[in-house]
Amino acid sequence: MDSLTFDLSKPIKVQLNVDGKNDFVDIDKIYFSAPSYKHRDLTIGLKKKFIEAVFAMTASLPKDEAQKQVNDDNGKLDAKSIKAILYAAKDFDIVSFFKKFEAFLISDIAFKDEEKKQKLVALDLQKLDESDFEELLAKYLEVFFIVSWMKTLS
């Protein structure tokens, strides 16, 4: 998959160029591109921190119980499991992880328009509802990162 459209539960007002005119409009979708190698400095850090969270959350569990905690019924790591890992991992710095993910998004991964010509900026991200941000983080990780990250763990 090379893109993702995320539906916001609470629209945000952003500055958007529509037909050559800048205006403030409400958007209810954010458009994402897949990461590429040029994002490696940011993705490597996120990958490392997420894997640390997985190990921190499952360290005290027997292997089969740890596997059940991390995977859904289909043996995959879904958005719900990702959020559980991030919040349940003991001594995991989730605030730092969220900040790194925010820096990654505004690097040129998140867009206000379907054509992906108008980047989402930090000010736009600050307007997101907290639950929308958590959900989009988990969904982005699920769609673009988990397959390669979990290969690292196997």
Image (cartoon, rainbow, N blue to C red):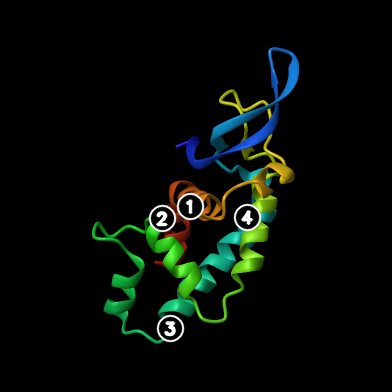
Mark 4 residue type = Phe
C-alpha distance separating marks 2 and 3: 21 Å
In this rendering, the label closer to the viewer, 2 or 1: 1
Label 2–label 1 contact, CB within 8 A: yes
139 vs 81: above or below: above
At 37% from the left and 56% from the top, the residue drawn is 78
Query: Which numbered disc flags the more N-terminal residue, 1 or 3?
Result: 3
22 vs 69: above or below: above
Mark 2: secondary structure: helix
Disc 4 residue crowd, few under 14, some 14–19, many 20+, Cα 10 Å = some
At 45% from the left and 55% from the top, the residue drawn is 146
Give the percent coordinates (x, y) of residue 20: 74, 13
C-alpha distance separating marks 1 and 3: 25 Å
Query: Which numbered disc flags the more N-terminal residue, 4 or 2?
Result: 2
What residue did someone put label 2 on?
A: 79
Give the percent coordinates (x, y) of residue 68: 28, 71
In the picture, the disc for residue 135 is 1
C-alpha distance separating marks 3 and 4: 24 Å
Query: Which numbered disc flags the more N-terminal residue, 3 or 4?
Result: 3
Mark 1: secondary structure: helix
In the picture, the disc for residue 101 is 4
What residue did someone put label 3 on?
A: 59
